[in-house]
Image: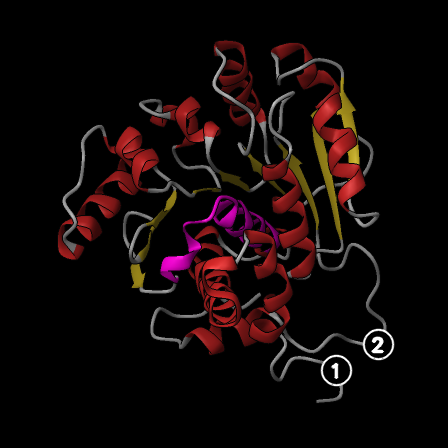
């Protein structure tokens, strides 16, 4: 895939990824995403990861999750493949099962709903050390790799912290000042040797060299699950072959624009799941075959 330059408009970036499909297109051409998340307590995050990824064009999504969460996620939609792992939370002894999952994967999203038990955080670190997949690292997985840049350095990883998670990565709070936030995101990305998409008032994406900042979201997107959707959108873009920088940049625009459309219709009543219905309005303009 051609890499858009930093001066491309958001719609040009989207058009570069979502080209009209050839009539001969087949399954796997547009990516198989692995989602690792969930626990006995939390099932919504990986479900939203998966649904967002499929709405944004991934051909297949497989969710590997502790059994209770996997069974709940399977009931959300017949489109999601789920693989139940025996136990209540991700642990080191589950990694062999994950390694042997059937199917070929193009990218991974990890972190949503995992919880922060020590064994879970250790399992996340071990998976990330050995994986060759491009990965979106979100939520609890960010706590696992905080202060461990040796795990992420030089790998094809996109970290998607919210403000509080970014404090964990940076080691200090950042003032609500765009110039300071941009500098700190760039410095932190350089320190971790990967790409960071910072979810604040502005979406700030940096790989330690390049940087993009856009005001993409709506104040109604404080509802739980909006960040899980973003991780899924970015995962679908990685699975299609986008670079981490482009996946963060384009993903933030798609999710934010769709959120604004949902908020315009529903205001205070908007749920994160309502955003799923708006992705098509953002990504399909001028990209459908025959148009």
Q: Where is residue 29? Give x, y as percent.
A: 76, 59
Q: Residue at x 38, y 33 (%)?
A: 153
Q: Is residue 93 left or right of residue 219?
A: right
Q: Residue furthest bottom?
A: 291
Residue range in magenta is 218-236
* Residue 179 found in image quarter: bottom left
* Residue 42 found in image quarter: top right
User: Number of marks in the image?
Assistant: 2
Q: Residue at x 67, y 60 (%)?
A: 55
How would you rate the neighbour count of disc 2 (Cα within 10 Å): few for under 14, some for 14-19, many for 20 or more?
few
SS of the residue under disc 2: loop
Q: Where is residue 83? Give x, y as percent.
A: 78, 30
Q: Earlier in the sequence, mark 2 or mark 1?
A: 2
Is residue 197 one of those drawn in magenta? no
- Do labels 2 and 1 touch, CB within 8 Å? yes
Location of residue 146 with respect to 92 vertically, above or below: below
Report, in whole angstroms, how far the alpha carbon at label 2 lies from the one at label 1.
Answer: 8 Å
Magenta stretch: helix, strand or loop mostly: helix
Q: Where is residue 212? Give x, y as percent.
A: 31, 61
Location of residue 74 with respect to 245 vertically, above or below: above
How would you rate the neighbour count of disc 1 (Cα within 10 Å): few for under 14, some for 14-19, many for 20 or more?
few
Give the number of the disc on residue 289. 1
Image quarter (top left, top right, bottom left or bottom right) of the C terminus: bottom right
Q: Is residue 90 left or right of residue 119?
A: right
Give the number of the disc on residue 23. 2
The figure's colour scheme reads secondary structure
SS of the residue under disc 1: loop
* Closer to the eye: label 2 or 1: 1
Q: Residue at x 73, y 37 (%)?
A: 73
């Amino acid at each position: 895939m051609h890499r858009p330059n930093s001066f491309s408009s958001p719609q040009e970036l989207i058009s570069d990824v979502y080209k009209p499909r050839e009539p001969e297109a087949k399954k796997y051409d547009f990516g198989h995403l692995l989602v690792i998340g969930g626990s006995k307590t939390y099932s919504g995050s990986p479900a939203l990861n998966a649904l967002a990824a499929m709405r944004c064009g991934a051909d297949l999504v497989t969710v590997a999750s502790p059994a209770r969460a996997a069974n709940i996620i399977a009931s959300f939609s017949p489109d999601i493949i789920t693989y139940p792992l025996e136990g209540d939370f991700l642990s080191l002894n589950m990694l062999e099962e994950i390694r042997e999952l059937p199917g070929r994967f193009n990218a991974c999203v990890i972190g949503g709903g995992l919880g922060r038990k020590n064994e879970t955080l250790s399992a996340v670190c071990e998976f990330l050390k050995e994986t060759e997949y491009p990965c979106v690292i979100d939520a609890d997985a960010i706590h696992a790799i905080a202060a461990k840049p040796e795990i992420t350095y030089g790998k094809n990883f996109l970290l998607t912290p919210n403000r509080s998670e970014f404090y964990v990565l940076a080691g200090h709070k950042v003032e609500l000042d765009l110039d300071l936030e941009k500098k700190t995101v760039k410095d932190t990305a350089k320190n971790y040797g990967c790409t960071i998409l910072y979810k604040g008032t502005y979406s700030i994406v940096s790989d330690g060299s390049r940087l993009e900042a856009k005001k993409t979201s709506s104040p109604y997107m404080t509802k739980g699950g909006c960040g899980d959707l973003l991780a899924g959108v970015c995962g679908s873009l990685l699975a299609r072959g986008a670079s981490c920088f482009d996946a963060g940049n384009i993903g933030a625009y798609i999710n934010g624009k769709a959120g604004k459309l949902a908020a315009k219709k529903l205001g205070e009543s908007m749920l994160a799941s309502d955003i799923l219905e708006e992705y098509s309005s953002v990504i399909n303009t001028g990209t459908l075959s025959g148009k």
